[in-house]
Amino acid sequence: MTPSIHLQLNTQRWLRDSPLTPYAIGYYDYLVLRRYSVETIEKHLASIAHLGHWMGQCHLSVGQLDEGTVTRFLDEHLPFCDCPCPAFGSRPDLRAACHHLLRVLRDLGVIPAPVAPASPIDREVARFDEYLCNVKGLGTGTRRNYRRVVRQLLEHRFGGEEIAFQALQPSDVRRFIAGQPERRTTSASASATAAALRAYLHFRALCGDDVHALQGAISTPAHWSLASLPKSLSDEEVGRLLEAFPPGLPSRRRAYAMVRCALDMGLRAGEIAHLALADIDWRAGMVTLRGTKSRREDILPLPVPTGEAIADYLRYERPRTAIPAVFVRRLAPHDKPIGSDAVQRLIRDAFRRSGLNHGRTHALRHTLARRLLEHGSSLKEVADILRHRSPDTSRIYAKLDTRALSTVALPWPGSAP
């Protein structure tokens, strides 16, 4: 159904008499197709009407419209705008509307795609990322974190200048590590920074550089293997979590199904976000995981409560969209898949509503491991379900197997025999 749009007379006139006039209908169709609300469509149309009016005053053609032109409009015109009412003046809405307009014009071939000038650091980080992907085979999230750390190091040392790797000294690396804010939080964060730097130095060593002295400057905090205790939820806490989805909660079926995927199947946030409709075999009760951390396909059984939660979401809450993902955005645009950050946020919100201190999706994986062990599963079976590449990764869950630990516990000194 086409929404009924109401625009001010000046807005209508500007849309009819500006360089953007031939593309106003296409822009409107673009917003309707992505199921934006009537209020948002009206704001965006008023925004491009204001932009078109300014372009006419500046004698700018559509072919001259790009990110730089939009920046001029927002930074130079908007603060001193004296356009007659009802000129739309909300900077966030104007910026969003202009972003969508550039996309529409590029899809129509009216303006060329942007060519971002690559800085020396951009080129170096791109080469490093290619090595991480094609040589090391690292996942998307790990590569993103590694790129962030290396970019910060290069900006710390070289700024916008050409990168002369031989000029990088051990003292530069030590100062960079000491200045990282995560060094003052957890040892795991500091270890991740060290791992990213070591990966970069290994890459440079393959390029023929001498990195021996630099490697010695990377310090890693003590982090004993299997020293920590996995944080899992008790059965009572699990019950509270599953009840933290009241009827009035926006997209409560989607959030509940995501929690069940993590709790019943041990899926990571990225795996939940990448789950596609074609990955679920409803007749066989199986799920194929494709966007996994190990970059391989895994097949898992679909528990009945999880399948019921997903089916409930698909039937009664999921917006109509052409994208194949199971879980999609609640708000427009619906043609973009949901990200792992959104999954983590929704699960954190469920923890908060239930009054639990846990805040990570991994706590639900740990909970699944604990429940499996308590019901007699072996560590090998836990490793298979959680899809650990190395059995050593699952050894830490032996600390959660209270049933088995009770058989080897020594009596407390002074206690009754």
Image (cartoon, rainbow, N blue to C red):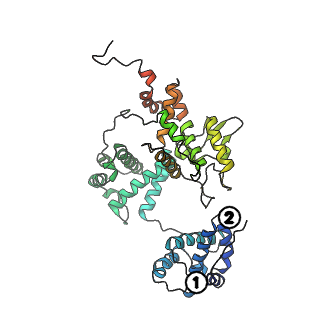
In percent of width and height, residue 147 lies at 43, 54
The C terminus - image quarter: top left
Q: Which mark is residue 33?
A: 2
Kindly tell me whether residue 112 is visible in this rendering.
no
User: Foreground: 366 or 250?
Assistant: 250
User: Would you say 313 lies left or right of 165 here?
Assistant: right
User: In terms of depth relative to the viewer, which is nearer, 300 or 2?
Assistant: 2
Q: Provide residue 299's location: percent of width, then percent of height.
A: 62, 36
Say if 376 sits above or below 80 in the image. Answer: above
* Residue type indicated by callout 2: Leu
Amino acid at circle 1? His
Q: Is residue 141 above or below residue 308?
A: below
Please report the residue visible at 43 percent of the width from the left and 25 percent of the height from the top. Answer: 402
The tag earlier along the polypeptide, 2 or 1, is: 2
Q: What is the quadrant of the N terminus in the image?
A: bottom right
Asked if residue 184 is positioned above or below residue 377 in the image, the reply reads below
Q: Is residue 314 above or below residue 402?
A: below
Q: Residue at x 36, y 44 (%)?
A: 191
Mark 2 touching mark 1, by CB under 8 A?
no
Residue 233 position, x and y percent, is: 46, 36
Q: Which mark is residue 373?
A: none
Q: Secondary structure at mark 2?
A: helix
Which residue in the structure is indicated by mark 1?
Answer: 53
Q: Quadrant of residue 100?
A: bottom right
Mark 2 → mark 1, Cα distance in angstroms: 26 Å
Indicate left or right for 307 with 98 as reference: right
Please name the residue shown 27% across and 54% down the image: 175
